[in-house]
Each structure stands twice: as C-alpha cells, then as structure tokens.
Amino acid sequence: MEKTAREIAQRLRQSGHIAYFAGGCVRDNGPRLPAKDFDMATDATPDVVQKIFPHTYAVGAAFGVVVVVEDGLNFEVATFRSTARISITPSGRCPVFLTGRRRQTPRLHDQRNVF
C-alpha cells in the first residue's frame, strides 16, 4: 500500500503539483504504528486529479476530495483548502466550515490538518 501511495504522490509531482501525505499515515508514523491508509493533500484541483488518474471518483466534491483507485486500493486525495471563517449551526452542535476561493497553499492547509 505504501509503495502505491508513493507512486500516486510521484505522479502528482511529475504533473507539476505539490503532493504531501496527510492524516493518519503521518500521525501514526511518529510512534511507528503501521499506517492503515494513505491520504494525500495537493494543490491539484479535483478535475485535474481525475485527469491524471484514470480510476477515480469524487467523494467530497464540495471539499475537494477525490478517491484514486490504484492496484485495487483506495487513496483519498484532497485539494489544499483553508477555513475562511467558522460559524456554528443554530443548534450549536457543529461548526460549519466556509472555505476560501483563492488558491490554497500547504501552509494554510496545515493550519487545519496533519502533514
């Protein structure tokens, strides 16, 4: 699984994009736990990710998340995003994240996620 994830990241980079591993595979690497999955963050937009990889499906189009299917495995690839502002729903139960429309960078994305 890790080898395939590295190949996906490399293909994004060869296409001129930034690609980082994100989420649990990074977090779990600290205590040397085996990664259960490999998620990635990139500056490539979902439509570009879908052009680079022939087997994909959008799972979170509103949030820029595309699943890339390689070697029978699923890898979530998310476009960098930032939270422009956060508001609370009327019930007060959950935050609503409103994302900015400008091109996002790893630094802005890093404020919200684990790399």
Image (cartoon, grey):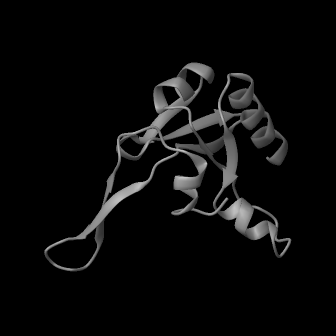
Q: Position of residue 43 (x, y in %)?
A: 56, 37
Up/down of 35 relative to 78, above or below: below
Is residue 110 found left or right of 82 in the rendered image?
Answer: right
Which residue is drawn at the image coordinates 68% and 30% (left, top)?
12
Up/down of 34 relative to 46, above or below: below
Residue 61: in sight, yes or no?
yes
Q: Quadrant of residue 36?
A: bottom right
Residue at the bottom extreme of this rendering: 92
- The one nearer the camera, 101 or 49, is 101
Q: Position of residue 79 (x, y in %)?
A: 51, 41
Is residue 97 found left or right of 90 in the rendered image?
Answer: right
Q: Position of residue 38 (x, y in %)?
A: 70, 52
Quarter of the image with the C terminus is bottom right
Is residue 12 found left or right of 4 in the rendered image?
Answer: left
Q: Position of residue 26 (x, y in %)?
A: 73, 62
Total count of labels: 0
Q: Quadrant of residue 98?
A: bottom left
Which residue is drawn at the image coordinates 58% and 54% (left, top)?
107
